[in-house]
């Protein structure tokens, strides 16, 4: 949580920074569409409310969900203005079933049961909203994190601050036809006139605990507290009940009180006595709702549950709303298509169809914090935080504990030879060279305090690890000796991630992400590092996920995740493109490419977020790409959409020449430039074309061919630092169709379809 609050302050600071700092960030790719596996499971449930038509609305710190079948299935509502809501209000008087959301970004209103939302922030003095209330006249009140009580002025259509509670700070509100009641962090309660002109303390010194909720009904106050139970009665005669209980939420239903406690489950009061309705020591309750006698509870991190016959039953399964700790792929992914997703609160999820669908691996002990997985779909190891290492040999049907001298497993990795590396959070590295039968602690060469391992990756004999102490180590002999690298080049911030080029043995490229100091790229195996934290990362220093593309040697793509989203660089970190697209949770903890990733052709990008669950960007190659360019005019159209270019196509020696990179990348090809040989290499699917500046001979899949047998003057040229090539020869080599319209001087390229 400390990190989360720190990030909030960083965000606020960024808002006022001059825009020129961001000159190296490319325009966001709005066409990126993320898939978020459906159904609520996990996340911090902040509220559960019932619409008049029977639908249930559950808000989390990451999204808003609706259930129309009594909690059997939850669907995410299309709310993308903020990450979840702190408060929910179902309006009865302002507008029937109007859905108000109080978020860290202000107030939002839906008039159609959550299908569309509108800004409701005009005049809002403080935007971090923690409470909402409505009186009998349809007046709406909002309470901010910093204690401002604000009222919506219906005539002027804006918010006005009517009272301030900063010493003590307000924590809860409730509105009636006469007053707004405000609970504070020191246990006091005030009543405030509806215009804010009069304020009176009516509850004082009954407790020192902050007030979590207030209801005033039929002359009786119901007041819950975060640390000291509940109070009921008149303002000057309150009965103290459930002393010492931590209560986050309560509801009134048919004359009874139902309280959601932190560690004592659901408690019921019938007007005379309290009794326990259901209790589970693994669940921290945060919200409660009663629907036709059925009790629903929200939890901190474990999703929504029903209370049935004195027991808690999970409302639904999925990984939409939970904290992702790791995303790992089967070592035999090409054949079994298996993806493992580890979570902080909800165990392990597995997909055997490359991420299309996921199931919970329920054979693991419930409540385990899963941190990492390595292996294939049948035999794999699962690391947990606090419960050690598990192994399954039957695809997750059963698990057995592995004998290893630590219970805190942080990262797992298996190399090409089947050697298994286990990074712990307290005792450094453990290595198994016999398939996991035995593990040996191997920390030689590591500093004594560097035993909290946070990252691992390797190719061939080279294995790299990162630590919480900010050190990167390499081993070439299966952990028998570790060597510190980049000691004076990478600041000593926690190492968040390490990624090696799959061609590391040749290009010696690796990247290191840090929690607080940006990204560092090495192209000499770790002997030296370059800080590639440009305009993107100078101010995005929390880089919890970073990966080099599986085809980095050809495409030079880097994937980075930070506290405000996902970014791609296509040139080794010089320029960055925001690919948040329609992803509605931006606090990214993990970013990975699927092993079969080829940009715009195959594979997917997987992103793990804090509380927002898993997001997947499935790359879909267009079945048909049509590119149109007009001679001597800048810009082109790709499938009817205009794409700007800084140089136009030209006619040279009666042949059309185009700036090669624009066109080839539009159809999904990769382009490489060799300045020594002055050679352009274009790769598309399994075909490769090589051309040389000033030469009429090219090579198609290694076979020499003349670009234009009838005109040897038709050669690739360089104009204003742009490489121009004869487009017909190139595209026809890839099986594309090239058309020329002499009247409009338009060249049309049709690829695919």
Image: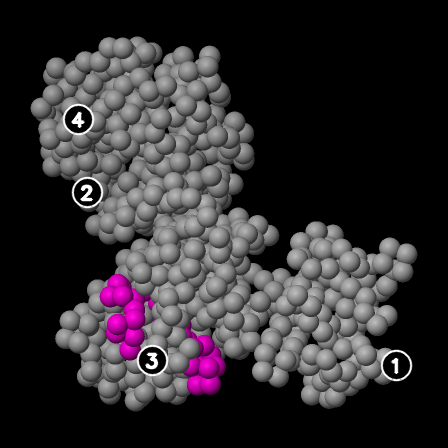
Provide residue 208's location: percent of width, then percent of height.
11, 31
Colour pattern of the rendering: one colour
Residue drawn at (33%, 20%) of the image: 161
Q: Is residue 183 above or below residue 696?
A: above
Q: Quadrant of residue 164?
A: top left
Q: Secondary structure at mark 4?
A: loop
The CA distance from mark 1 to mark 2 is: 87 Å
Compare marks 1 and 3 and give the one earlier in the sequence. 3
The one of 563 and 176 positioned closer to us in this rendering:
563
Residue drawn at (83%, 59%) of the image: 746
Residue at the disc numbered 4: 167
Q: Secondary structure at mark 2?
A: loop
Q: Is residue 73 visible?
A: no
Q: Is residue 169 above or below residue 459?
A: above
Residue placed furthest toward the front = 720
Compare marks 2 and 3 and give the one earlier in the sequence. 2
Q: Is residue 608 above or below residue 594?
A: above
Q: Is residue 332 magenta?
A: no
The CA distance from mark 3 to mark 4 is: 55 Å
Q: Are marks 2 and 4 in contact (CB under 8 Å)?
A: no
Residue at the disc numbered 1: 710
Residue drawn at (48%, 53%) of the image: 23
Residue at the disc numbered 2: 264
The CA distance from mark 4 to mark 1 is: 87 Å
The one of 75 and 467 positioned closer to us in this rendering:
467
Residue at the disc numbered 3: 527
Compare marks 3 and 4 and give the one earlier in the sequence. 4
The mark lying in front, picked from 2 and 3, is 3
Q: Which mark is residue 376?
A: none
Q: Are marks 2 and 3 in contact (CB under 8 Å)?
A: no
The boundaries of the magenta stretch are 485-511
Provide residue 266's location: percent of width, then percent of height.
24, 39
């Amino acid at each position: 949580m400390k990190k989360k609050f720190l990030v909030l302050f960083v965000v606020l600071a960024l808002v006022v920074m001059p825009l020129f700092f961001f000159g190296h960030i490319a325009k966001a790719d709005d066409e990126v569409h993320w898939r978020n596996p459906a159904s609520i499971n996990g996340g911090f449930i902040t509220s559960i409310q019932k619409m008049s038509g029977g639908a249930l609305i559950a808000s989390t710190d990451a999204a808003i969900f609706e259930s129309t079948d009594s909690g059997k299935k939850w669907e995410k509502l299309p709310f993308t203005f903020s990450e979840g809501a702190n408060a929910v209000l179902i309006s009865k008087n302002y507008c029937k079933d109007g859905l108000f959301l109080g978020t860290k970004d202000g107030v939002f209103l839906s008039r159609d049961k959550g299908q569309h939302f509108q800004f409701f922030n005009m005049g809002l003095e403080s935007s971090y909203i923690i409470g909402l209330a409505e009186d009998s006249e349809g007046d709406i009140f909002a309470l901010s994190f910093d204690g401002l009580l604000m009222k919506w002025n219906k005539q002027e259509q804006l918010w006005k601050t009517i009272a301030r509670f900063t010493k003590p700070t307000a924590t809860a509100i409730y509105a009636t036809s006469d007053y707004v009641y405000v609970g504070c962090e020191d246990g006091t309660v005030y009543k405030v006139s509806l215009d804010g002109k009069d304020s009176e303390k009516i509850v004082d010194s009954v407790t020192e605990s902050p007030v979590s909720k207030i209801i005033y009904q039929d002359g009786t106050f119901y007041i819950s507290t975060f640390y000291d139970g509940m109070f009921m009665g008149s303002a000057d005669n309150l009965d103290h009940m459930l002393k010492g209980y931590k209560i986050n939420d309560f509801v009134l239903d048919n004359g009874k009180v139902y309280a959601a406690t932190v560690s004592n489950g659901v408690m019921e009061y019938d007007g005379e006595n309290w009794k326990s309705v259901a209790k589970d020591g693994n669940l921290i309750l945060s919200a409660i709702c009663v629907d036709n006698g059925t009790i629903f509870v929200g939890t901190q991190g474990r999703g929504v549950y029903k209370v049935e016959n004195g027991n808690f039953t999970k409302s639904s399964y999925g990984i939409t709303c939970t904290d992702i700790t790791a995303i790992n792929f089967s070592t035999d992914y090409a054949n079994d298509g298996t993806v493992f997703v580890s979570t902080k609160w909800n165990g392990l999820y597995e997909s055997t169809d490359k991420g299309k669908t996921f199931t919970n691996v329920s054979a693991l002990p419930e409540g385990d914090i899963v941190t990492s997985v390595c292996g294939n779909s049948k035999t794999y190891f699962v690391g947990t935080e606090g419960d050690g290492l598990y192994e399954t040999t039957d695809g997750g049907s059963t698990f057995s504990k592995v004998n290893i001298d630590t219970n805190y497993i942080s990262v797992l990795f298996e190399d090409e030879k089947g050697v298994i590396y286990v990074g712990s959070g307290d005792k450094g590295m453990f290595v198994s060279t016999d398939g996991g039968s035995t593990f040996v602690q191997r920390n030689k060469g590591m500093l004594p305090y560097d035993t909290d391992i946070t990252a691992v990756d390797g190719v061939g004999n080279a294995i790299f690890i990162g630590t919480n102490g900010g050190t990167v180590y390499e081993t070439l002999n299966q952990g028998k000796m570790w060597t510190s690298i980049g000691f004076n080049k990478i600041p000593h911030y926690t190492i968040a991630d390490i990624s090696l080029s799959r061609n590391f043995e040749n290009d010696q490229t690796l990247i290191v992400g840090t929690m607080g100091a940006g990204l560092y790229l090495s192209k000499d195996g770790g002997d030296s590092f370059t800080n590639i934290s440009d305009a993107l990362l100078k101010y995005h220093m929390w880089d919890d996920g970073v990966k080099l593309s599986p085809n980095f040697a050809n495409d030079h793509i880097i994937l980075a995740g930070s506290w405000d989203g996902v970014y791609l660089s296509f040139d080794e970190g010089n320029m960055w493109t925001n690919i948040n697209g329609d992803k509605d949770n931006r606090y990214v903890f993990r970013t990975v490419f699927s092993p079969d990733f080829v940009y715009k052709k195959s594979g997917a990008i997987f992103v793990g977020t804090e509380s927002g669950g898993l997001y997947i960007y499935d790359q879909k190659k267009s079945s048909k790409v049509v590119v149109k360019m007009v001679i001597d005019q800048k810009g082109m159209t790709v499938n009817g959409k205009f794409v700007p270019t800084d140089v136009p196509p030209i006619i040279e020696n009666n042949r059309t020449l185009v700036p090669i990179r624009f066109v080839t990348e539009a159809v999904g090809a990769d382009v490489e430039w060799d300045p020594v040989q002055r050679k352009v290499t274009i790769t598309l699917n399994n075909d490769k074309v090589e051309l040389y500046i000033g030469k009429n001979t090219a090579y198609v899949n290694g076979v020499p061919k003349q670009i234009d047998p009838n005109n040897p003057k038709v050669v690739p040229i360089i104009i204003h630092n742009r490489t121009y090539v004869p487009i017909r020869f190139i595209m026809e080599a890839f099986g594309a169709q090239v058309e020329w319209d002499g009247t409009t001087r338009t060249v049309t390229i049709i690829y695919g379809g």
